[in-house]
Image: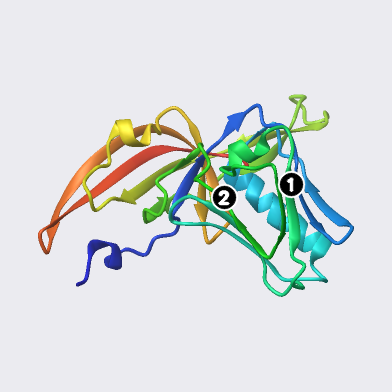
Amino acid sequence: MVTARDRWDPQANGLAKVTSGWTGTAAVTVGVVVATVTPFARTSSAEVWAQLLAECKRVHGESSSWEAWVGDDGKLTLVAEDLTSAGFDLDFTSSLEDDLGFSSSSYSGELQYTSNAAPPDAAANGLPIIADGLPHAAIAALSAVSDGSGAPTAISVGGPVTLRIYDDTLAASLARYALVSFVWDVVAAGTRIMGRMHAHSINNTRRGELAGVPEAVAEIAGEAVAL
């Protein structure tokens, strides 16, 4: 049966809330070589996971092919596709594992690890998302002096963004998403972050039915902000 989802061409499949206060490290060890990531003080689980993948490719790229993704259930996965059977170790400090949905701070000897749960900052897991206006945010440099003689200062330049989240259960509610007034990373294609937005309002719209199944769309309006 063709569903409303099949008629969409979603660009993203999840959101991760951007929050402050991140600490700790995530480390991937192959043999005696360690790839370590320290999260930004203000970040999201999706951004941390993307940074870890990039660092694994940089440090361990010659020994294995690395992949990582955010699943439709929101869980995080990291894979070394052609590493030896000895596997790799995954370690966290300062309770970073809790922020990423893992139940332990140390894992060893496997070729793939998946978090036990979706990170607490994840939302709209696995729901098709159309993002109008992303990527949009950029960094512009303006002189601190009116005549242009001063050193440039970086400022964020954004624009309007609308997310349309398809939810075939008609359960898209303010209580469920709790998106308004927060900043979110819009996640697509595994760990790729399409952009970051500040959500201002949400409107839930019923779009009729297909084969007796209600079609509902949550439209979230906001503005792009710089990563």
Quarter of the image that includes the N terminus: bottom left
Residue 118 in the image, given as x and y percentages of width and height: 50, 45
**For residue 84, above or below residue 157:** below
Q: Of helix, strand and loop, which one carries label 1? A: strand
| N-terminal label among 2 and 1 | 1
Quadrant housing residue 102: top right
Residue sitting nearer the eye, 75 or 204: 75
166 relative position to 28: left or right:
left
For residue 91, the mark is 1
Q: Of helix, strand and loop, which one carries label 2? A: loop
Q: Amino acid at mark 1?
A: Asp
Quarter of the image that includes the C terminus: top right
Q: Residues within 10 Å of mark 1 (few under 14, many from 20)?
A: some
Q: Which residue is mark 2?
A: 115
Q: Is residue 44 visible?
A: no
Residue 192 in the image, given as x and y percentages of width and height: 58, 56
